[in-house]
Amino acid sequence: VLDYLNIYTDFLRIVLEIVNAILTYALPRNPEVVYALLHRQELFAPFRSHPRFSELLDNIQAVLDYFNSRMDTTCSGNGSADISVEKVLAVVTATARAWRGDGIKLFTELRFTYEEEAHPEEFFVPYVWSLVCAHSSIPWDPAAIALFGPTSGFQNAILDGEIEEIGAPVLPQNPSNLNSQ
């Protein structure tokens, strides 16, 4: 249970770091993100006291406070029943253009790198072929396409006759072939 809690905590921290990066470096170009934050701002309250999230939530709260005050000023005469989604998004968009980032704590810019798995072809070959089938003008029959990745140790044992798999399809001698029947 503790491992899952650490995984969820790490994941939530990554999400909050991404949101912070958007707010810090690209807020004027992302009014929809600000709208979503305003719409669901109550979701952040339970995490404010958590030591791993507090600094990240300080920035989010600064943005929310800024935009909430602008919404209050702009919409105070209309009454809350008259405010449409389009009106709120228009106010957020106009306010985002004037955003200067005052009160935002700068964190190091996030850099993500691709870490290749031991056998990336096990994912990429079927994925690429699914894209080819879905988006090409060739009328592929997906049921007739057999995709075999490179042989694993288990598949090698089957091919060598060390393991007999009941009801298993016969693997081709060259499993990297892509067969279209």
Image: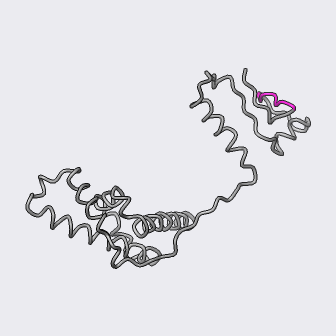
Q: Measured from the top left, where is residue 66 in percent x and y?
A: 26, 71
Residue at 26% from the left image edge and 61% from the top image edge:
94
The color scheme shown is one colour
Q: Measured from the top left, where is residue 11 in percent x and y?
A: 51, 63
Q: Is residue 169 magenta?
A: yes
Residue at 35% from the left image edge and 63% from the top image edge:
28
Q: Measured from the top left, where is residue 99 in percent x and y?
A: 31, 69
Residue at 71% from the left image edge and 44% from the top image edge:
122
Q: Is residue 179 magenta?
A: no
- What predominant SS class does the magenta segment belong to? loop
**In the image: residue 157, left or right of residue 90:** right
- State which region is magenta: 167-173
Residue at 43% from the left image edge and 68% from the top image edge:
25
Residue 95, by quadrant, is bottom left
Of residue 121 and residue 88, the one placed in the foreground of this image is 88
Q: Quadrant of the C terminus?
A: top right
Vertical order, 90 against 64 (above or below): above
Of residue 125 and residue 26, the one placed in the foreground of this image is 26
Residue 154, by quadrant, is top right
